[in-house]
Amino acid sequence: MGRIFQARPMVTAETHRTTLFEIFFDLVFVFGFIRVTAFMGDRPSPVRLTQGFLVLLLLWISWLVYSWLGNQARADVGVMRVGVTGAMAAIFLAALVIPDAWATGPGTRAPRLLLVLSFVVVRLIHLALYYWAADSERLRRTVRLYALSSVLSWIPLALGAVLGGTAQILLWTVALTIDMSGGVLASVLSGWPVHSPGHFTERHSLVVIIALGESLISVGAGIGARMIHQRILLAALLTIAVTVCLYWLYSASAATAALALTRESGLRRDRVAANSYSLAHFPLLAGTIYVALGVEEVFAGLAHKESHGTSEWIAAIALFGGTALYLAGRATFLSLSVRRVRLEQFLAPVAALVLLPAGRYLPGLAALGLLAAFLAALLSYEAWTRRSATIGRAE
């Protein structure tokens, strides 16, 4: 009981690692990602993909600020634990109304306002806890700077919820741009200290793994309760192959980047963390969710025994465009962390986009097979080049 009602925050040390409570906290984001994918998969269109992207960014900011908070002070102790639990409830409510957040017409404003209110509550709790847990005047100044930009971003966010339609897309784009820019500006002007590089890198790796799991969840969403047949079984194997390849492509990069962040110190460490993790990991997350959407569309077509291509352009864009976004995020992550990107890592997003037209005209199962073959070839080539480079250094 003493840990629950502890009066002061427990500031983290260099050796701090991710707590079980933080993993539990991530569960509401699993639900949020499922809701976003379900929303985009219901009558998919370019507008829906854009709307889904904005909601993903909103969820990303909500997760991101608490990953930084957990690096500053233990999230599973005292007032911090109570506050983070309250934020979980608000995020859960926001995720619940995501499919209705873009509806238009009479009586559709309430879900949008509830989503915005939930997001504001999440952010207010975060700002209050971070200011309370700050162990230096420099950090308190950083929180105050970020609070100003955050409050400013809530104005277009609320206006967009009131107006709806195209105005909502434009105003929410402005709001989220202000919010992200405010965090970057606060980092540049004052700095967000990273106490434990190990905790920070673990948190970001875990959220990527959670997002990758959405690809597997989408298999069930796509087929529903329909009878399983051989083509669905083959597609399931291809989906697990795609997911495994995406994971290994990330994990090889993450290990190198984590070591590089550990070797940094002071303001340099703080800025590398903010740029390579807080900024560059969002394309990784968004790309993964789009791939999950593409998988869901392929399985929906197979379950209905449709023989045409991958649901016009939308599923192809989700599969191959999502993969390109993921690979572009990985290249950006490497360039900002280890400051070295090999040629094949730089060209991989372009290659994924080149395959997109083929994905449009191939049957869904063949398109999924093409994506799996591309990722397996990329993974194999990168493993071969790393092994060759290691042998070359040894000689």
Image (spheres, rainbow, N blue to C red):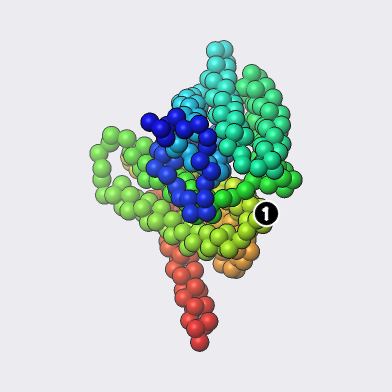
Residue at x 25%, y 45% (from the top left corner): 229
Residue 11 spot, x, y in % from top left: 53, 43
Please tell me in which quadrant of the rendered image residue 129 appears. top right
Residue 308 appears in the picture as rendered:
no
Residue at x 51%, y 41% (from the top left corner): 10
Residue at x 57%, y 46% (from the top left corner): 282
Q: Along the horizontal axis of the image, is 105 left or right of 187?
A: left
Picture quarter with the N terminus: top left
Q: Residues within 10 Å of mark 1 (few under 14, many from 20)?
A: some
Please tell me in which quadrant of the rendered image residue 227 appears. top left
On screen, residue 300 above or below 162 = below
Q: How many marks?
A: 1
* Residue extending furthest toward the bottom: 395
Residue 248 appears in the picture as rendered:
yes
Question: For this rendering, which residue is in front, 365 or 208?
Answer: 208
Q: Secondary structure at mark 1?
A: helix
On screen, residue 206 above or below 175 = below
Residue 356 spot, x, y in % from top left: 53, 53
* Residue extending furthest toward the right: 189
Residue 109 spot, x, y in % from top left: 57, 17
Residue at x 69%, y 25% (from the top left corner): 155
Please tell me in which quadrant of the rendered image residue 26 appears. top left
Question: For this rendering, which residue is in front, 382 or 197?
Answer: 197
Residue 187 spot, x, y in % from top left: 69, 46
> Type of residue at label 1?
Leu
Question: For this rendering, which residue is in front, 97 or 370?
Answer: 97
On screen, residue 255 above or below 79 = below
Question: Which residue is labeled 1 in the image?
Answer: 267
